[in-house]
Image (cartoon, rainbow, N blue to C red):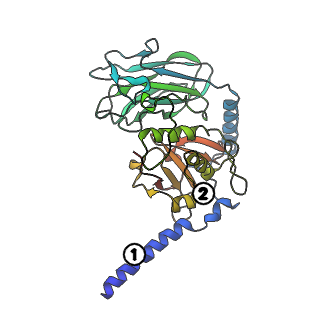
Amino acid sequence: MRRLGLVILVAVLATLLVSIATFTAGAQTTSSTSVSQGTFTGAAPSDAERRAATVDMAEEESLPDYSQVVDNSHSDRFDAPGWKLGGSDVWAHGGDYASSGASTSDARFKLKTPTDGDYALYAWWPVREGNSSAARFGVETATGTKWVEVNQTRDGGAWVKLGTFQMKAGDRYLVRLSPEGGSGEVIADAVALVRGASSPPPNHLAPAEGGTGENVYGALATRSERRAIIRQGRKHLGTPYRPSPPYPCQAYSKEDCSCFTKLVFRHFGKRLPDNPVKQYLNHGTRVGGKANLKRGDLVFFKEAGWNRPITHVAMYSGNGYVLHASNYYAYKKVVESKMKYLKGYFAARRLQKLN
C-alpha cells in the first residue's frame, strides 16, 4: 500500500511539473526580454543577411499583385501525355482532374511570370482513396529545378502551398508532376502562382463548397469549414507584426501570433484570449503527434527550451506549413512558412473535432 501511494505521489508531482513548465512566466509574451515570436532554427543571420532580406521583402511589396491559375482543363496550358483525363470529384478544382495511370511522362503546367522575383506556388488535388502518398512536383526556378514531395492522401480540396521560389520572367512550362512517387496514383488537378511571398492564393473553390466557402464553425463541422478557416487566415498575410499587449490587437493593421489566431477564429464565432499560453491551456483537445495534424489545428512553440513557457502559436495550413504572425527579422508580419524551420515545437490543439 505504501509503495502504491509513492507511485501515485510521483505521478502527481510529474503532472504538476509539466503544468508549471507550460504556464510559468505566461506574461513573458509582454516582456521586453521575451524570445522573438516565430524565430527560425539555425544560426542567427549576419547583419548583411538581415539587410538583404529586408530589401528583398521591400521589393516584393512594391510589385503589383499578380496571380495565375492553370487547371487540368486548360488544354493550351496543361500537357499530360498518357495520363487519364476526365476524372470527376466534388473536391477537385473545377470538378475534374487527371490521374497518372500507366503513363511514364510528366504532366506539365504552363505559367507566365511577368517579372523576375519571388513567387509562391500552390497546388490543388482532391483527396481520394488510392492517391499517391509521395507525389513529386518539379518547379523550374531561377537556379534550376526544385522538387517538392506532397502526400495526396490528405490536405486536398483546397490550395496547398508548395513553397516560395525565385523565378525568371517568361511564359513556359514551369511546373511538372512526375507520374512516379510513393504508392498510389498521382493526381494532376490545378496549380496557382502568386507574386510575392506574402500574398494569398486566388479564392477559387471546389464545387462541393457551392461557390461560397462561408461556413459556420462548430462541433459538427464539415471538411469545407477547415478550408474556410485557412482561407480566412490567408486574408491576413502581410499584416505587420506588433505585440499585443502592450499594443491593441487590430485586424489587418497590427497583429502578433495570438492576436492573429484570435481574429481568425473570432470570424467563425470562436472566442480565444490574446495569449498563446492561455490558448493552449484552456481551449481544445491535444493532438497526438505532428503526423496527425489537420488544417486549422493550433500549434504551439517553446522557443527558449522545453522547460520554458510557450512563446508562440501558429495555425497548421497543410503540407507541413503554418500560418502565423512572425517577429523573425525579415518578416515581421503574418506569413505562411514551413513549420519544421520554426524553433521549439511543443504541442498542438484542436478546438473542435473537425472532419
Q: Residue 188: x, y in percent?
A: 39, 24
Circle 2 residues within 10 Å: few <14, some 14–19, many ≥20: some
Q: Residue 115: x, y in percent?
A: 63, 21
Which residue appears at 56% of the width and 63% of the height?
309
Q: Which quadrant is the N terminus positioned in?
A: bottom left
Residue 313, placed above or below residue 179: below
- Disc 1 marks which amino acid? Ala
- Disc 2 marks which amino acid? Pro
Relative to 203, 115 lies left or right? right
The outermost residue toward the bottom is 2
Q: Which residue is label 2 attached to?
A: 273
Q: Nearer the viewer, mark 2 or mark 1?
A: 2
Mark yes or no: residue 264 visible.
Answer: yes
The outermost residue toward the right is 247
Disc 2 element = loop
Q: CA distance from mark 2 to mark 1?
A: 30 Å
Mark yes or no: residue 41 visible.
Answer: no
Pick whichever, 327 or 355, lies toward us: 355
Dot 2 or dot 1: first in sequence order is 1
Pick whichever, 131 or 211, lies toward us: 211
Q: Which residue is label 1 attached to?
A: 11
Across the whole image, how many numbered discs are drawn on residues? 2
